[in-house]
Image (cartoon, rainbow, N blue to C red):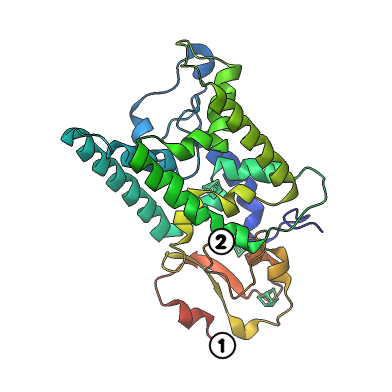
Amino acid sequence: MAKGVEKRKRGPERYRWRSQAAGLLLLNPFFGYFISRTPYEGPLKGICAPGLNCYACPFTAFACPVGGLQYGFALLRDRAAETILKGFGVILYVGAFLSFVGTLVGRLPCGWICPFGLFQELVHRVPLRKRGFPRRVASLRYPILLGLVLLLPLLTGASWFSRLCPAGFLEGALPLKAIPPASPLPKAGGLLWFKAVLFGALIVWSALVYRPFCRAVCPLGTIWGEFHRVSLFRLDAKLALCSSCGKCSGSCPVDLELPEELSSPRCIRCLRCVGSCPHGVISAGFRWGSREKVTEKGV
Ligand code: SF4
Ligand code: SF4
Ligand code: SF4
């Protein structure tokens, strides 16, 4: 069986598609755009979405946390004290949102809510021979976060990640081209074509590899993944029951070595491993106590 294309879902993962579909609709409920041809600009637009959901999407009611972070850093380049203060405010607000979600559930929104994660999973269903994902490629996500989301916006005053973001192309540029808004948009020029090429490349990559953008690029997943060692929602293993059969590792769509890497920042919290273990070794849930107590042998 190709990695990432499971035939039968067991355990909590059975409910994941429904949750992802609900996430897509809840984050993008503004179907009034079809009639008004004016994107939603109400008060909800100031609230961060729990997933990579483009602010420019005409159907969305929420803000993208990655877009917000870049915006905050870009404002710091201004000379006016008021704008700089606003920039710090935005960074604090988005930082608090990211820390809150990360401390509570880590990357759970990646597996269960994010529309762009769902999109990559759907593309991965294309029946092509699947390829492996070199682990070292996953390290790219750190320089991308530091360079495109934090440093370049700070140095140039522009949102560089958003300028190249394939989620922005899918959720913002494409629908706005297909159903143009009442007030014409500024000309995007050559950058739109470059974005289209990146998006096309991602489609091919996603057809061959499970969620490559989530694993090698996405700043949001990168930030939330760093909370896995402290988040209240955890994956744990009762190692005394483990027969080392390898079924959990075989089921993991992002190729983690399980049960050892349950707290890895690369885990997208799909919870597939929970249902894959024939002995019920792996469990998921909110826990307050120390991790070692649950995972140590004999418990
Ligand atoms: S890592 Fe993937 S699923 Fe998670 S926020 Fe980014 S695009 Fe969405
Ligand atoms: S360890 Fe793998 S299978 Fe388990 S929740 Fe994480 S990504 Fe999914
Ligand atoms: S599937 Fe269960 S028993 Fe098999 S190696 Fe994984 S944790 Fe151990």
Identify the image quadrant of the N terminus. bottom right
Instruction: For the C terminus, give its image quadrant.
Output: bottom right
Q: Which residue is mark 1?
A: 297
Position of residue 293 measured from the top left corner of the image (x, y, whole percent) = 46, 82
- Name the residue at 66% across, 81% down: 242
Give neighbour class at mark 1: few <14, some 14-19, many 20+ (Cα, 10 Å).
few
In this rendering, the answer to whether 184 lies above or below 155 is: above
> Dot 2, how many residues are within 10 Å of its Cα: few (below 14), some (14-19), or many (20+)?
many
| Secondary structure beneath label 1 | loop
Q: Is 92 drawn above or below residue 78 in the view shown?
A: below
In terms of image quadrants, where is residue 259?
bottom right
Q: Quadrant of residue 87?
A: top left
Q: Position of residue 63 (x, y in %)?
A: 41, 35
Out of 178 and 115, give the one closest to the viewer.
178
Above or below: residue 298 compared with residue 56? below
Quickly name the residue at label 2. Answer: 266
Q: Secondary structure at mark 2?
A: loop
Above or below, 90 against 296 in this view is above
The residue depicted at 28 percent of the width and 47 percent of the height is 92
Q: What amino acid is at disc 1?
A: Lys
Q: Give the tally of numbered discs.
A: 2
Observer able to see residue 137: yes
Q: Nearer the viewer, residue 151 or 217?
A: 151
Respond yes or no on whether mark 2 lies under 8 Å from ligand 2.
yes
Instruction: Identify the image quadrant of residue 272.
Output: bottom right
